[in-house]
Amino acid sequence: MAKQIDLKLENSEDFIEIFTDGCSLGNPGPGAWACLIKLNGKSITLSGGEPLTTNNRMELQAVISALSYFKTPKKLVVYTDSNYLLKGITEWLPKWKKRGFKTSEGKEVKNLDLWKRLDELNRFHKVVWKKVKAHSGIKENEFVDKLAKKTAKKV
């Protein structure tokens, strides 16, 4: 049974909902990403893939592709089941930026090109980040998961 998401935001009707997922078949291996944008009562689906990538890169690419879809600033709520993405954008990124995109160990942040692009998009739009549990019956999350896996098999 599909679960409903409880969106507790002020003026939530002003927010565009986005669901994202990424995967790789092997890590690294062929991978893909997918996103579902719920806009004005309709759904827009985007997906793509790469022949040699990682799961984390595809998680990032999914949300970058969704946020890049909009050419003017929007109010967005992004649902993700990726702890890497969620912690990265809400906790780690501000610290990385203060350290010149270095980890606490002084190493360069992995996937730096994607983190920098996501940072730009996150500042361009008003984004609220929401965690959803993977494989918990949330139909939109299940949809992007299946689409990413299907796309990865075609890469």
Image (spheres, rainbow, N blue to C red):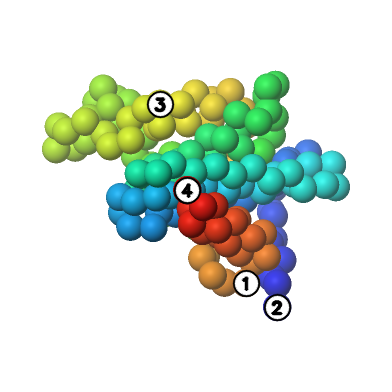
Task: Say what amino acid the circle numbered 3 marks.
Answer: Lys
Q: Is residue 91 left or right of residue 143?
A: left
Q: Point out which mark residue 31 bears.
A: none
**What is the x, y in percent for residue 118?**
47, 31
- In primary-sequence order, the first of circles 4 and 3 is 3
Residue 51, quarter of the rendered image: top left
Element on which disc 4 rests: loop
Residues under numbered marks 2 and 1 in contact, where contact means CB atoms less than 8 Å apart: yes
Task: Say what amino acid the circle numbered 2 marks.
Answer: Met
Q: Point out which mark residue 155 bears.
A: 4
Dot in front, 4 or 2? 4
Q: Point out which mark residue 116 bears.
A: 3
| Alpha carbon separation for disc pair 3 and 1 | 32 Å
- Which residue sits furthest bottom? 1
| Alpha carbon separation for disc pair 4 and 1 | 27 Å
Residue at left offset 59%, top offset 44%: 47
Element on which disc 3 rests: helix
